[in-house]
Image (cartoon, rainbow, N blue to C red):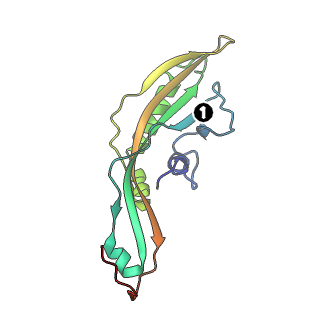
Amino acid sequence: MFDSSKLYKMLKPDSNPDLITSLPVIIGGTTAVPNYISGCVIIHPLSPKPITSQFKNMLDFVMDGKAKQSTLYELTYQIDIYKQNAKNAKTIEVENEATKIQEWLKSFEVEEYLRTLDCEIYANYKPIRLTLNADLNAQFTNRASFDVTIISTNQISEKIDIIEKVVFEKTLTI
């Protein structure tokens, strides 16, 4: 099953962590402290939900003695980019960063990576939301956010012993 750590690896590949974004990527709910001034990307799961009922493969049960069950899940994540613009910036920097990340998530490399995990990503045509945040010290920080949805398969299996022979010792009649 897909989890947030895989989304982290999509934005920060091991081979070149700054390929997509140089900003630190934080998975929501961690103890990492985001720096909204110099910038950060925060990934937060919104609504994981099953989109199919469980499927039990009885052929596998007969062939290898394992009861397997799988369900398709739709996992929606919100990606937030925070950063304070440089004084002489001519554009909103988080808008550029959000567009770059959103386009990367549509790339062939991401599609291939997800295929190795038995997952797919929905075509992302959702809007990028832009807001301006102000803290108690009257410092303004720009925020860009968008949602991305991943379809994954959650599979569980359990070893089952197959009964070889059944012996009836009593006959019950009702």
Q: Residue at x 60, y 21 (%)?
A: 86
Q: Please indicate whether residue 166 sits to the left or right of residue 16 in the image.
A: left
Identify the residue at horizontal 60%, vertical 39% (top origin). Answer: 26
Viewer-proximal residue, 126 or 161? 161
- Label count reads 1
Residue 173: x and y in percent read 30, 77
Residue at image coords 46%, 22% = 130
| Nearer to us in this view, 99 or 48 | 48
Which one is in front, 67 or 100?
67
Q: Position of residue 80 (x, y in %)?
A: 52, 31
Q: Nearer the viewer, residue 100 or 169?
A: 169
In percent of width and height, residue 42 lies at: 56, 35
Q: Which amino acid lies under the numbered mark 1 shown in the image of this protein?
A: Cys
Q: Residue at x 47, y 70 (%)?
A: 158
User: Is residue 98 something that shows in the picture?
Assistant: yes
Q: Can you say which quadrant of the picture contains the C terminus?
A: bottom left
Q: Is residue 99 visible?
A: no
